Amino acid sequence: MSERRKLDQRRFSRVFDLRFWNQPWAVTIGYFPDRKTPGEVFINAQKTPGTDLDSQARDGAILMSLCLQYGCPVEVMRSALTRNADGSPSAITGAIADQLLVE
């Protein structure tokens, strides 16, 4: 098993808003010291905090973060996530993976 790469206590991060499922989301990406490699993801439902949907998104962000810290490439994660017939993401985690590849 690979070793988990830990993030510095203080780290560069980027915050952006994303609209998905006709709802606004606040997304924070934390980076490793090179400021290019993502190492953690936080997702918050802006209009419906504390709902089942928000909890599912937050749990998805935790799993994405662990994958990144154990060295899983974003492209591998992205290709494993559910997609609609047209190739668009089926869930907020897929939309974030898409955004990470644009960077």
Image (cartoon, rainbow, N blue to C red):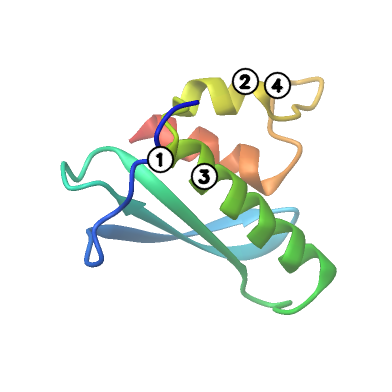
Q: Name the residue carrying label 2.
A: 79
Q: Earlier in the sequence, mark 1 or mark 3?
A: 1
Percent x, y for residue 5?
Answer: 34, 41
Check contact, mark 2 vs mark 1: CB within 8 A. Answer: no
User: What's the distance in space between the residues labelled 3 and 2, CA to CA?
Assistant: 17 Å
Q: Earlier in the sequence, mark 4 or mark 2?
A: 2
Q: Residues within 10 Å of mark 3 (few under 14, many from 20)?
A: some
Q: Name the residue carrying label 4.
A: 87
From this view, report whether residue 26 is shown above or below residue 100. Answer: below
Say which of marks 2 and 1 sits in front. Answer: 1
Q: Quadrant of residue 58?
A: bottom right
Q: Amino acid at mark 2?
A: Ser
Q: Amino acid at mark 3?
A: Leu
Q: Earlier in the sequence, mark 2 or mark 1?
A: 1
Which numbered disc covers residue 66?
A: 3
Check contact, mark 1 vs mark 4: CB within 8 A. Answer: no
